[in-house]
């Protein structure tokens, strides 16, 4: 996909001076540890016991990825990341909020003092509105572009994190296309698309006769990506039994085909993408810690579209042009409405909506219908006077129905793939689907 010139122009933008914050551990096992949160940082700062956290706390009561810090217009945003023992600010339990400076944050047996630093002039942010095939001119995206540029020119493994539909695969391809391996192959392996014993064969290849159906020798994705880039998509879904073999391949630069008796050298730039919280997967024992640290030499966290101010209209116009919309562009009043009320979906859903608008025009269904209906259902249940347990059941049933509809649509109707994306067993997925279908029919 070629990005129009309008999306690659650079305009230097000087952000308004913004205060930074210093966090210092004043009580607990890691007393004296510090971290500074500045607006120039490309992604949020993590606090927890994991080695991947910028402020690492050696406290057994602190979760691996306990909380996140990010600068906002209203101060230092602090978000508890579903920690086991909670986050407390000046004695009050906090899930998500803003700090001004002077507060004491307590996690486990650790106390952290928050100090507001003097506002300083920030270096100019590039006004570019794209990085390769990734489109976005919001401050949130422009903050990560310099990091993307540096990583594209390196050869270190990179983990790209973000919700479904945020553009992780597009970013991985952009890193490949703007780096020194651009002329080499670019191979994508989706961990949710293959299951069981076939996954090892897809990754590493197999020799003829290695198993029933192996009628010929076949290369795996590592060999196919030799001299280029391999993206392992949804790596959080990789079979635990295969993770040691992947670790060996990454560390040694060699693989062994299924049924083979000799190692094969491979020269591959490895990228990984995931919608899962790998720190939590490690803590739960579903992902090997040594593999995680070997892959997460660098990490990029892509923000969801709802947090990318100004990008909804930019992306809508881009998709309108690339999908063959008329010269007038998408309806201006609709773009203003999406920007004002916050787009409820992700980048992929925005593209699909634009495609429907181009194809159906006024016959296209209202794009806010699903989000609005969710609120209507909750309000209706609350006003219905049902007992708490029954009211909760109705809301949960509605959520489950829509969730299943969404993941099935994303998977093209493939139940196995939808179940894998959901992180639940296929049998339970089908039982849940059947139950909800029966309830709808009755």
Image: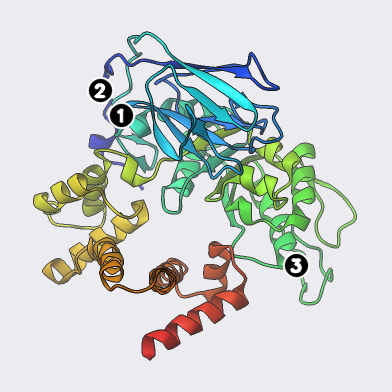
- Residue at the disc numbered 2: 11
Residue wearing tag 3: 197
Residue most toward the right?
Answer: 261
Residue 265 in sight: no
Q: CA distance from mark 2 to mark 3?
A: 51 Å
Foreground of the two, 170 or 18? 18
Q: Residue at x 77, y 72 (%)?
A: 214
Is 57 located above or below residue 373 in the figure? Answer: above
Q: Position of residue 111 (x, y in %)?
A: 58, 23
Q: Quadrant of residue 241?
A: bottom right
- Which type of secondary structure does the marked residue at label 3 adopt? loop
Residue nearer the viewer, 2 or 304: 304
Give above or below for 256 relative to 376.
above
Residue 73: x percent and y percent?
Answer: 30, 26
**Where is residue 299 drawn, in percent x and y?**
56, 34
- Residue 148, placed above or below residue 348: above
Q: From the viewer's perspective, is 351 left or right of 60? A: left
**Do callouts 2 and 1 mark residues in contact (Cβ within 8 Å)?**
yes
Q: Position of residue 215 (x, y in %)?
A: 77, 74
Q: Which residue is mark 1?
A: 128
How far apart are the alpha carbons under marks 2 and 1? 6 Å
User: In the rendered structure, which disc, 2 or 1, sits on the residue that comes first in sequence?
Assistant: 2
Number of numbered discs? 3
């Amino acid at each position: 996909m070629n990005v129009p010139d309008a999306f690659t122009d650079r305009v230097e933008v000087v952000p308004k001076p913004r205060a930074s914050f210093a966090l210092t551990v004043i009580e607990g096992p890691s007393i004296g540890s510090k971290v500074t949160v500045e607006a120039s940082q490309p992604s949020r700062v993590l606090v927890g016991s994991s080695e991947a956290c910028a402020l690492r706390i050696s406290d057994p009561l602190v979760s691996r990825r306990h909380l996140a810090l990010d600068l906002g217009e209203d101060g230092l945003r602090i978000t508890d990341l579903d920690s086991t023992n909670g986050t407390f600010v000046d004695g009050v339990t906090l899930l998500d909020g803003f700090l001004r400076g002077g507060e004491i944050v307590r996690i486990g047996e650790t106390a952290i003092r928050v100090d507001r630093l003097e506002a300083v002039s920030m270096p100019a942010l590039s006004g570019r509105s794209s990085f390769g095939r990734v489109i976005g001119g919001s401050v949130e995206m422009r903050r990560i572009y310099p990091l993307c540029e540096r990583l594209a020119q390196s050869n270190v493994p990179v983990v790209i994190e973000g919700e479904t539909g945020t553009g992780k695969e597009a970013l991985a391809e952009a890193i490949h296309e703007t780096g020194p391996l651009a002329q080499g192959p670019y191979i994508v392996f989706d961990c949710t698309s293959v299951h069981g014993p076939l996954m090892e064969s897809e990754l590493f290849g197999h020799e003829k006769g290695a198993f029933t159906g192996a009628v010929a020798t076949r290369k795996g994705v590592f060999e196919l990506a030799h001299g280029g880039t391999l993206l392992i998509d949804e790596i959080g879904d990789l079979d635990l039994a295969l993770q040691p073999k992947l670790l060996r391949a990454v560390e040694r630069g060699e693989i062994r085909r299924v049924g083979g008796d000799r190692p094969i050298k491979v020269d591959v730039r490895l990228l990984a993408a995931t919608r899962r919280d790998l720190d939590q997967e490690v803590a739960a024992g579903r992902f090997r810690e040594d593999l995680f640290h070997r892959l997460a030499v660098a990490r990029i966290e892509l923000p969801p579209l709802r947090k990318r101010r100004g990008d909804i209209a930019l992306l809508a116009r881009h998709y309108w042009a690339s999908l063959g919309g008329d010269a007038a562009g998408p309806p201006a009043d609709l773009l203003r409405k999406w920007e004002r009320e916050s787009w409820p979906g992700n980048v992929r859903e925005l593209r699909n909506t634009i495609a429907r608008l181009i194809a159906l025009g006024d016959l296209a269904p209202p794009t806010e219908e699903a989000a609005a209906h969710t609120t209507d259902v909750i309000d209706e249940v609350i006003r219905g006077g049902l007992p708490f347990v029954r009211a909760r059941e109705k809301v949960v049933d509605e959520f489950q129905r829509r969730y299943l509809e969404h993941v099935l649509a994303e998977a093209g109707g493939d139940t196995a793939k939808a179940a894998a994306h959901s992180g639940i067993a296929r049998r339970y997925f089908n039982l849940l689907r059947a139950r909800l279908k029966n309830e709808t029919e009755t």
